[in-house]
Amino acid sequence: MRWLIAGILLLVPLTVSAAEEAFDTFLKQFSYETRADMKANSKQLLRLIEEKKAVLVDIRFPEEAKVWRMNFGLHIPLNELPQRYKELPKDKIIVAACPHKDRSSLAMAYLRTKGYNARYLTDGLIGLAESLRGDDAKDFREDTSCCP
Protein backbone atom coordinates (compact mmCIF):
# COMPACT_ATOMS: atom_id res chain seq x y z
CA MET A 1 0.00 0.00 0.00
CA ARG A 2 2.85 2.41 0.83
CA TRP A 3 4.41 1.94 -2.61
CA LEU A 4 1.06 2.77 -4.21
CA ILE A 5 0.71 6.00 -2.24
CA ALA A 6 4.33 6.94 -2.97
CA GLY A 7 3.73 6.27 -6.68
CA ILE A 8 0.64 8.45 -6.73
CA LEU A 9 2.47 11.26 -4.95
CA LEU A 10 5.25 11.08 -7.54
CA LEU A 11 2.74 11.33 -10.40
CA VAL A 12 0.80 14.30 -9.06
CA PRO A 13 3.58 16.90 -9.36
CA LEU A 14 4.34 15.75 -12.93
CA THR A 15 0.71 16.12 -13.96
CA VAL A 16 0.35 19.54 -12.38
CA SER A 17 3.66 20.63 -13.89
CA ALA A 18 2.59 19.58 -17.40
CA ALA A 19 -0.74 21.40 -17.01
CA GLU A 20 1.00 24.50 -15.72
CA GLU A 21 3.46 24.40 -18.61
CA ALA A 22 0.66 24.13 -21.19
CA PHE A 23 -1.19 27.05 -19.63
CA ASP A 24 2.02 29.08 -19.36
CA THR A 25 2.58 28.53 -23.09
CA PHE A 26 -1.00 29.62 -23.84
CA LEU A 27 -0.57 32.80 -21.81
CA LYS A 28 2.86 33.62 -23.28
CA GLN A 29 1.37 33.46 -26.78
CA PHE A 30 -1.71 35.50 -25.84
CA SER A 31 -2.30 38.53 -28.08
CA TYR A 32 -5.07 40.79 -29.33
CA GLU A 33 -5.61 38.31 -32.16
CA THR A 34 -5.96 35.45 -29.65
CA ARG A 35 -8.43 37.51 -27.65
CA ALA A 36 -10.59 38.13 -30.73
CA ASP A 37 -10.26 34.54 -31.98
CA MET A 38 -11.32 32.95 -28.68
CA LYS A 39 -14.84 34.39 -28.85
CA ALA A 40 -17.95 33.61 -30.87
CA ASN A 41 -21.41 35.09 -30.52
CA SER A 42 -24.58 33.18 -31.34
CA LYS A 43 -24.86 34.51 -34.89
CA GLN A 44 -21.26 33.52 -35.62
CA LEU A 45 -21.78 30.10 -34.04
CA LEU A 46 -24.92 29.42 -36.08
CA ARG A 47 -23.14 30.43 -39.29
CA LEU A 48 -20.16 28.18 -38.45
CA ILE A 49 -22.48 25.24 -37.70
CA GLU A 50 -24.38 25.78 -40.95
CA GLU A 51 -21.03 25.76 -42.78
CA LYS A 52 -20.09 22.56 -40.87
CA LYS A 53 -17.00 24.30 -39.47
CA ALA A 54 -17.88 24.19 -35.77
CA VAL A 55 -19.27 22.03 -33.01
CA LEU A 56 -21.16 23.37 -30.00
CA VAL A 57 -20.13 21.81 -26.68
CA ASP A 58 -22.51 22.38 -23.79
CA ILE A 59 -20.31 22.19 -20.69
CA ARG A 60 -23.05 22.63 -18.07
CA PHE A 61 -23.63 20.21 -15.22
CA PRO A 62 -25.77 17.15 -16.08
CA GLU A 63 -28.67 18.46 -13.98
CA GLU A 64 -28.78 21.67 -16.00
CA ALA A 65 -28.72 19.84 -19.33
CA LYS A 66 -31.52 17.50 -18.22
CA VAL A 67 -33.79 20.48 -17.59
CA TRP A 68 -33.16 22.10 -21.00
CA ARG A 69 -30.68 21.68 -23.80
CA MET A 70 -30.12 22.34 -27.45
CA ASN A 71 -30.85 19.27 -29.54
CA PHE A 72 -27.64 19.75 -31.50
CA GLY A 73 -24.04 19.76 -30.38
CA LEU A 74 -22.42 17.71 -27.67
CA HIS A 75 -22.84 17.70 -23.91
CA ILE A 76 -19.62 17.28 -21.95
CA PRO A 77 -19.80 18.75 -18.43
CA LEU A 78 -16.83 20.95 -17.58
CA ASN A 79 -15.69 18.63 -14.81
CA GLU A 80 -15.63 15.70 -17.28
CA LEU A 81 -13.69 17.59 -19.95
CA PRO A 82 -10.23 16.34 -18.85
CA GLN A 83 -11.38 12.74 -19.37
CA ARG A 84 -13.49 13.33 -22.50
CA TYR A 85 -11.88 16.10 -24.58
CA LYS A 86 -10.56 13.53 -27.09
CA GLU A 87 -14.18 12.94 -28.17
CA LEU A 88 -14.05 16.37 -29.84
CA PRO A 89 -13.03 16.70 -33.48
CA LYS A 90 -9.66 18.37 -34.08
CA ASP A 91 -10.72 19.55 -37.55
CA LYS A 92 -13.55 21.81 -36.33
CA ILE A 93 -13.83 24.92 -34.22
CA ILE A 94 -15.03 23.89 -30.77
CA VAL A 95 -17.40 26.45 -29.25
CA ALA A 96 -17.87 25.87 -25.53
CA ALA A 97 -21.12 27.14 -24.03
CA CYS A 98 -22.82 27.55 -20.68
CA PRO A 99 -25.74 29.84 -19.71
CA HIS A 100 -23.52 32.93 -19.60
CA LYS A 101 -19.78 32.58 -20.23
CA ASP A 102 -17.86 31.92 -17.02
CA ARG A 103 -17.48 28.13 -17.34
CA SER A 104 -17.25 28.19 -21.12
CA SER A 105 -14.26 30.52 -21.01
CA LEU A 106 -12.50 28.03 -18.72
CA ALA A 107 -13.33 25.21 -21.16
CA MET A 108 -12.02 27.27 -24.08
CA ALA A 109 -8.70 27.94 -22.32
CA TYR A 110 -8.34 24.28 -21.36
CA LEU A 111 -9.08 23.06 -24.88
CA ARG A 112 -6.59 25.52 -26.37
CA THR A 113 -3.88 24.08 -24.13
CA LYS A 114 -4.77 20.69 -25.66
CA GLY A 115 -4.31 22.00 -29.21
CA TYR A 116 -7.95 22.62 -30.15
CA ASN A 117 -9.20 25.65 -32.04
CA ALA A 118 -11.63 26.53 -29.26
CA ARG A 119 -13.84 29.51 -28.57
CA TYR A 120 -16.43 30.37 -25.97
CA LEU A 121 -19.96 31.57 -26.68
CA THR A 122 -19.99 35.22 -25.61
CA ASP A 123 -23.74 35.53 -25.21
CA GLY A 124 -24.08 32.07 -23.68
CA LEU A 125 -26.76 29.46 -24.16
CA ILE A 126 -29.35 31.98 -23.03
CA GLY A 127 -28.36 34.27 -25.90
CA LEU A 128 -28.29 31.32 -28.30
CA ALA A 129 -31.81 30.28 -27.25
CA GLU A 130 -32.93 33.86 -27.84
CA SER A 131 -31.40 33.70 -31.34
CA LEU A 132 -33.30 30.51 -32.17
CA ARG A 133 -36.91 31.52 -31.75
CA GLY A 134 -39.76 31.21 -34.22
CA ASP A 135 -38.75 31.48 -37.84
CA ASP A 136 -35.06 31.61 -36.93
CA ALA A 137 -35.30 28.15 -35.34
CA LYS A 138 -37.22 26.80 -38.33
CA ASP A 139 -34.69 28.22 -40.79
CA PHE A 140 -31.71 26.93 -38.78
CA ARG A 141 -33.21 23.45 -38.54
CA GLU A 142 -33.87 23.35 -42.30
CA ASP A 143 -30.44 24.75 -43.21
CA THR A 144 -28.42 22.37 -41.05
CA SER A 145 -30.53 19.21 -40.78
CA CYS A 146 -29.37 19.35 -37.16
CA CYS A 147 -32.46 18.14 -35.47
CA PRO A 148 -35.04 15.37 -35.81
Image (cartoon, rainbow, N blue to C red):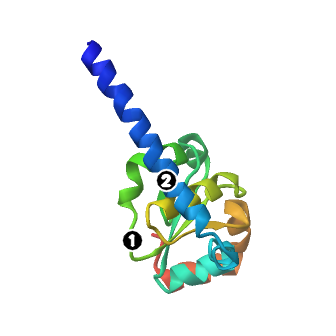
The span from disc 2 to disc 1 (Cα, nearest Å) is 21 Å
Kindly state the secondary structure of the residue where label 2 is placed.
helix
45 horizontally vs 116: left or right = right
Is residue 70 visible in the rendered image? The answer is no
Answer with the quarter of the image where residue 100 lies: bottom right
Query: On the image, numbered disc 1 is attached to which residue?
Result: 90
Where is residue 121 drawn, in percent x and y?
A: 65, 67
Foreground residue among 128 and 116: 116
Where is residue 131 drawn, in percent x and y?
A: 71, 73
34 horizontally vs 91: left or right = right
Foreground residue among 65 and 102: 102
Placement of the N terminus among the 4 image quadrants? top left
Foreground residue among 72 and 97: 97
State the residue at coordinates (47%, 49%).
19
State the residue at coordinates (59%, 84%).
47
State the residue at coordinates (58%, 70%).
29
Q: Decide: marks 2, 1 in contact (CB < 8 A)? A: no
State the residue at coordinates (44%, 61%).
114
Task: Classify 10 Å Cα crowding around label 1: few (below 14), some (14-19), many (20 and above).
Answer: few
Query: What amino acid is at disc 1?
Result: Lys
Query: On the image, numbered disc 2 is attached to which residue?
Result: 21
**Above or below, comparing residue 22 to residue 116 in the picture:** above
Query: What amino acid is at disc 2?
Result: Glu
6 horizontally vs 128: left or right = left
Is residue 44 visible in the rendered image? The answer is yes
Where is residue 15 drawn, in percent x and y?
A: 41, 42
Q: Nearer the viewer, mark 2 or mark 1?
A: 2
132 horizontally vs 59: left or right = right
Q: Earlier in the sequence, mark 2 or mark 1?
A: 2
